[in-house]
Image (tube, rainbow, N blue to C red):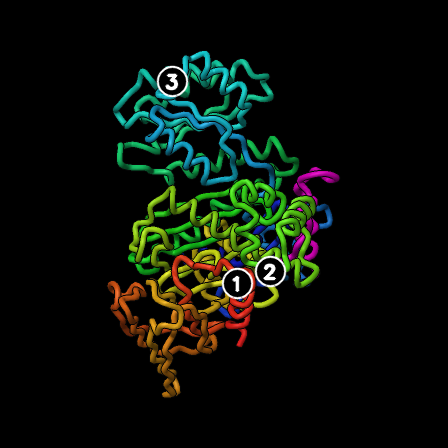
């Protein structure tokens, strides 16, 4: 079965339409294995002057053609599929989309802390902004609820509520409010409705609303009081996303047709890869992925068969960076900068970045500013995700990251960093991982593309993940506990493949590395001191680990969790400089 699918789809072209860049990536079989061949990039063209998503896609494919020498587009402008024996064309196309303003969502549910909460979480799993919440216990009269929906002008209403076989009368009351409010809106401004409540009355609700709005249905996202099933609504969310975006963006319907209906929100494709990896790795640890884009940030964590995902359409390193200052005071950003930087410089940088989201740092100072903002974007996104969702794995303390393996970093903040040491340091400062974990860099920004390519061919996604398209930055050992600066908190004994050994005693407050090149491995005996915890069975418990080499080898982060920066500006500047150089030695 698998062999026939390989023959059917040797080559796959993925199209990724981001808010600033559009990428076309080519995957094909090389020496019997799927590999990432090359990518072409162009400026996204969903907005003025082109107002047509296809223009950027075609430009990216032309660049890919120049790089590979392979013809992918016919003289009449159509895509060549399937591939021909002479090597032209591709066998399959898949596409992801993250461009476009956040979709305006009204969340509707029976009870605030049950189905309404689930409806909000479902909206937050894709590119959206919640503009209103409506529930039976919101204390409003029906007329006020209708007014609220009208005033919010939603593009999408997520309607949940009622356990399976449970309440029906209240759901009909809410359906009436949704239907009437939609009816009162001009026909072209009516929202799309997704009903994901009590399954037993799904058909009735659909018949009630269908004369007024387009209705999509999904399995109940809250079938039991203590059980939430957001993943079951995935296919319906995808359909709604496509319907809303196709109405906003010219050319999208054609791109979806090229990909035979396989257009996915980029965040969904990213989450799919993390979910997939969650099944392969240690079920006692979470696979964590963070994708920092220009307009949004996606956080996904998976362990066993469980996935949590959150998209922040108000964070990001480009046009939405100004919204960051609503969530984070400027002094939290300046604390990562030398004492010569003041808040005004941070505010100017943020305003400039929002106005020119595709700009890249032009000086060492701008790079420091970008990375300081990046640390806080990463920290805010992960902190908020873990506050709203429980990860099923253990952790040393409730206020820090759970045990993870591996952590995947995606997005220009990391992939376009001038050095891998800087990329890792931004991640360590922002995420503050605990215990022992591998950190992997998606250096070619392929994770969303692989998530959608997996629909065409799952084997392709697996083999490209295992290839050199991804860069193992290193194994991070971060002991959790508290001690005075300079107190020894960890003993390491490293045995290399060639028989050499090295010992190290790590003091609290330090950041250090032991080189271990990619392709090599080592046996590491870890012994925490003073009841520090590295996730090997509790405080003070050590053990032996088999560690694979990476760009930075073994990195020991004994700076404490959560990280504490000195209040004194001069002291802090010195310490930050020491950390910056610790990983490059």
How far apart marks 3 and 1 lie (CA) works out to 50 Å
Residue at 40% x, 36% y is 233
Residue at numbered disc 1: 572
- Is the Cβ of the residue at disc 3 closer than 8 Å to that at disc 1? no
Q: Is residue 296 left or right of residue 273?
A: right
First-in-chain label (3 vs 2) = 3
Question: The residue tagged with tag 2: helix, strand or loop?
Answer: loop
Please say whether residue 22 is visible from this viewpoint. no
First-in-chain label (2 vs 1) = 2
Q: Quadrant of residue 504?
A: bottom left
How far apart marks 2 and 1 lie (CA) works out to 8 Å
Magenta-drawn segment = 38-66
- Label ID, residue 139: 3
Where 313 sits versus 132, above or below?
A: below
Residue at 37% x, 59% y is 404
Q: Position of residue 427 (x, y in %)?
A: 49, 59
Q: Position of residue 115 (x, y in %)?
A: 35, 29
Q: Is residue 371 left or right of residue 392?
A: right
Which quadrant does the N terminus fall into?
bottom left
Residue at numbered disc 2: 339
Question: The residue tagged with tag 3: helix, strand or loop?
Answer: loop
Magenta region includes residue 30: no
Please say whether residue 534 is visible from this viewpoint. yes
């Amino acid at each position: 079965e698998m062999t026939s699918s390989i023959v059917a789809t040797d080559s796959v072209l993925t199209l990724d339409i981001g808010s600033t860049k559009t990428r076309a990536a080519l995957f094909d079989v090389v020496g019997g294995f799927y590999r990432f061949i090359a990518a072409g990039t162009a400026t996204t063209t969903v907005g003025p002057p082109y107002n047509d998503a296809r223009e950027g896609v075609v430009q990216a494919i032309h660049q890919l053609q120049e790089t590979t020498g392979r013809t992918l587009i016919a003289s009449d402008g159509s895509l060549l599929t399937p591939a021909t024996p002479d090597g032209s064309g591709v066998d399959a196309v898949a596409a992801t989309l993250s461009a476009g303003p956040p979709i305006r969502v009204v969340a509707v549910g029976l009870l605030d802390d049950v189905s309404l909460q689930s409806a909000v979480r479902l909206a937050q799993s894709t590119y959206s902004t919640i503009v209103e919440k409506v529930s039976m216990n919101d204390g409003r009269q029906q007329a006020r609820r209708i007014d609220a929906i009208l005033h919010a002008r939603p593009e999408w209403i997520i309607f949940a509520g009622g356990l399976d076989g449970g309440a029906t009368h209240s759901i009909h009351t809410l359906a009436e409010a949704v239907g009437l409010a939609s009816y009162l809106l001009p026909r072209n401004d009516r929202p799309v409705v997704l009903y994901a409540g009590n399954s037993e009355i799904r058909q009735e609700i659909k018949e009630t609303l269908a004369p007024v709005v387009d209705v999509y249905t999904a399995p109940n996202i809250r079938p039991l009081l203590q059980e939430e099933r957001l993943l079951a609504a995935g296919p319906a969310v995808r359909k709604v996303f496509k319907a809303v975006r196709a109405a906003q963006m010219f050319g999208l319907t054609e791109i979806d047709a090229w990909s035979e209906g396989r257009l996915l929100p980029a965040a969904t494709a990213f989450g799919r890869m993390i979910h997939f990896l969650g099944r392969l790795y240690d079920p006692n640890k979470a696979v964590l992925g963070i994708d920092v884009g220009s307009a949004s940030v996606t956080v996904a964590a998976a362990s066993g068969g469980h996935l949590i995902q959150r998209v922040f359409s108000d964070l990001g390193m480009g046009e939405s960076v100004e919204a960051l200052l609503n969530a984070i005071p400027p002094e939290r950003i300046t604390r990562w900068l030398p004492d010569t930087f003041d808040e005004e410089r941070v505010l100017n940088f943020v305003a400039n970045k929002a106005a020119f989201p595709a700009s890249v740092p032009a000086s060492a100072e701008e790079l420091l500013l970008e990375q300081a903002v990046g640390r806080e974007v990463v920290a805010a996104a992960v902190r908020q995700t873990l506050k709203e969702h429980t990860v099923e794995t253990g952790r040393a303390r409730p206020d820090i990251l759970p045990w993870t393996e591996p952590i995947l970093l995606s997005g220009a903040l990391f992939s376009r960093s001038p050095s891998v040491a800087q990329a890792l340091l931004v991640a360590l400062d922002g995420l503050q991982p605990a215990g022992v974990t591998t950190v992997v860099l998606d250096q070619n920004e392929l994770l969303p593309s692989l998530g959608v390519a997996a629909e065409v061919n799952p084997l392709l996604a697996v083999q490209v993940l295992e290839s050199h398209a991804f860069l193992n930055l290193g194994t991070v050992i971060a002991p959790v506990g508290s001690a005075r600066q300079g107190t020894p908190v960890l003993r390491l004994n490293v045995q290399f493949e060639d028989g050499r050994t090295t010992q190290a005693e790590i003091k609290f407050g330090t950041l250090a590395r032991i080189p271990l090149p990619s392709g090599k491995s080592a046996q590491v005996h870890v012994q925490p001191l003073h009841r520090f915890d590295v996730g090997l069975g509790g405080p003070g418990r050590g053990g032996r680990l088999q560690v694979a080499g990476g760009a930075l080898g073994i990195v020991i982060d004994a700076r404490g969790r959560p990280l504490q920066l000195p209040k004194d500006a001069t002291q802090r500047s010195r310490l930050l400089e020491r950390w910056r150089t610790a990983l490059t030695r």
